[in-house]
Amino acid sequence: MGDALDVALVGYGQAGRVFHAPLIAHTPGLRLRTVVSSRPGRVRADFPDATVVADPAEAFADPRIDLVVVATPNVTHAPLAIAALAAGRHVLVDKPMATSLDEARRMAEAARAAGRVLSVFHNRRRDADFLALRRLVEGGHLGEVVELHSHFDRFRPQVPDRWRERAGPGAGLWFDLGPHLVDQVLLLFGMPLDVRADIGAQRDGAQVDDYFHVVLRWPRLRAVLHAGALVADNRLRFAVHGTGGSFTKHGMDAQEAALRDGIAPGGRGWGRDPRPGLFTPAGSGGIGAPREVDGPPGDYLASYVAMRDAILGRGAPPATLAQSLAVMQVLEAGRESAATGRAVPLPAAAPVSGPPAPAGGRD
């Protein structure tokens, strides 16, 4: 493998160009060697040293490639990942893992058969606000959590002409933003007992769902996952309540906006939350004064560092296959619940835990 792992990035649309390419380029030990794209000029303007090819098979067949990153429309995730694994490449695929649980299971089996690392880019588990919440939960500061509201709302009244907004497998808001919210809550609390989902289209001209309100149920805890495209006041991110207090958070993690602005990831101040959440303690003595929660900075680069280390046999991948399959199981249950109007039970499973939340961050 030489002094760095060579990476082939498949897709140079929004996900590939804004998220994956900059993170690959700024992760020590990784080298962006090849980009699969139909727009070579755009790639070369950003990465003049990268090779640009039009056919993914050409990149998969290149013996220099160690890792393939799939950042293409959701319907292509499974076939591209399976082909790359069959060619002997490690694979990181953008969320969602696939368009169905059956596809995801076939991907996992292909990885096992090839003896290669397969993981999913669940970057929002490394948002600053989620890391702050996770620290509160794991530290017992909230006591027993009984209610969680996780919002990812926007005000986008016009329906854009892009694949996510056209009817087809894996399109729509539930499979776009749902994986983020599901992955986060599973990391905190494990698999719920059942899922009840209301998923629909609210905007004029919408071909796919642009709204979801999903309730996950545990014996005592209820987690509400919500996203809409017609929410003008879209500041609420988290409202979490437990026997020991509440955590509320407004505003989104700053890393996506920084990447869109072309700011190099990982520099001084990267991932700092401009609007920290508030923790309100509660107990037998009453309700205390709210205070800001100084959590660790967000760190999307950690996903690629973990992928690099997993390939080199130094640790777990950024999301394990068990975690990624659990997310797909909940997504599919939500889709079934919305179609039938019933709560869909989920089989009992071990907690979908990840590495502990970081104690701090870089200066």
Image (cartoon, helix red, strand yellow):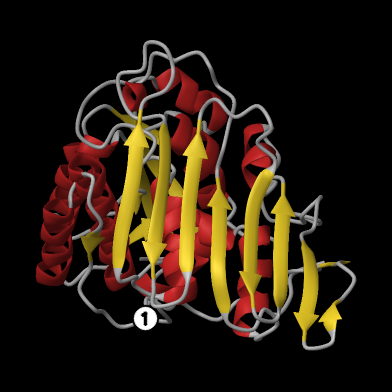
Residue 311, given in percent of the width and then of the height, sits at: 35, 71
User: In this view of the protein, which residue sits in the foreground, 78 or 262?
Assistant: 78
Q: Residues within 10 Å of mark 1 (few under 14, many from 20)?
A: some
**Quadrant of the image for the C terminus?**
bottom right
User: In this view of the protein, which residue sits in the foreground, 170 or 314?
Assistant: 170
Q: Residue at x 50, y 13 (%)?
A: 158
Q: Is residue 68 left or right of residue 81?
A: right
Q: Is residue 334 left or right of residue 215?
A: left
In the image, residue 204 sits, relative to residue 64, either above or below, namely above
Outermost residue on the right side: it is 289
Q: Residue at x 44, y 15 (%)?
A: 160
**For residue 320, which quarter of the picture?**
bottom left
Q: Is residue 150 left or right of residue 181?
A: right
Say if residue 173 shows up in the picture: yes
Q: Residue at x 25, y 64 (%)?
A: 325
Say if residue 28 shows up in the picture: no
Q: Secondary structure at mark 1?
A: loop
**Quadrant of the image for the N terminus?**
bottom left
In the image, residue 217 sits, relative to residue 219, either above or below, namely above
User: In this view of the protein, which residue sits in the foreground, 214 or 302?
Assistant: 214
User: In this view of the protein, which residue sits in the foreground, 32 or 233?
Assistant: 233
Q: Is residue 140 left or right of residue 219?
A: right
Residue 253, given in percent of the width and then of the height, sits at: 67, 49
Residue type at mark 1: give it. Answer: Pro
Q: Which residue is mark 1?
A: 351
**For residue 267, which quarter of the picture?**
bottom right
